[in-house]
Image (tube, rainbow, N blue to C red):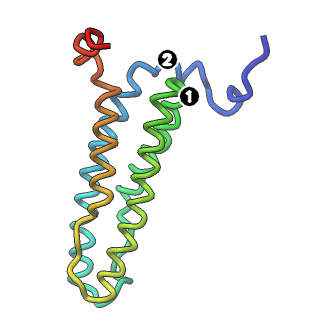
Amino acid sequence: MLPSPLEFLVPLGALESVAGVLPYVILVVVLVNVVTRLLAQRSFERAADEGDDDDALSRYLPHEIVNVLLIVLSFAFMVVEPHGGMVLSVLVVGMVISDFFEYESRRVEARNNMEIERPNSALVASVLVIAYAGYQALFFLIEPIWSSII
């Protein structure tokens, strides 16, 4: 049997050995992402109060690291669980894109001496990612009810 072309890029055997805990790890990283988003918002507000323009604002490195980790984990989950991983990956990429635009919005607000607002679109995207990651990780809790309906 020929090896899959993907096996040269991703160690499938190692990935399959952690497939059972991957949804739980993703759920934890998504929750950490929400915490780092709140810390980033505080950092932006503090920097905007201290600085005179948008140069005072900089990306919050822990949040950016968690974003990259979440993307990598969702893509790894897509290899193990194609359907659930694809849905999760789309949600995570959408959340990261909204984070990017929210950061740019904070810079515009700082540049124009406006009040720094909450990252509303990123928060909504986070809620969607938390809901789906929770569904993937905690499906065993609703499986009896789900099985009786479906």
Res 13 → quadrant: top right
The residue lying toward the viewer, choosing from 1 and 136, is 136
Q: Amino acid at mark 1?
A: Val
Is label 2 in contact with label 1 (beta carbons under 8 Å)?
A: no
Relative vertical location of residue 42 with respect to residue 53 in this rendering, above or below: above
Residue at coordinates 38% horizontally, 60% vertically from top-left? Answer: 99
Q: Which mark is residue 79?
A: 1
- The image quarter containing residue 108 is bottom left
Give amino acid for label 2.
Ser
Q: Which dot, 2 or 1, sits closer to the camera?
A: 1
Q: Secondary structure at mark 2?
A: helix
- Against 79, residue 109 (above or below) is below
Is residue 84 shown left or right of residue 127? right
Closer to us: 49 or 95:
95
Mark closest to the chain's N terminus, 2 or 1 = 2
Q: Position of residue 66 (x, y in %)?
A: 39, 49
Q: Is residue 90 above or below residue 84?
A: below
Look at mark 2 in the image and give the residue it sits on.
17
The image shows residue 72 at horizontal and vertical percentages of 50, 41
Alpha-carbon span between mark 2 and mark 1: 12 Å
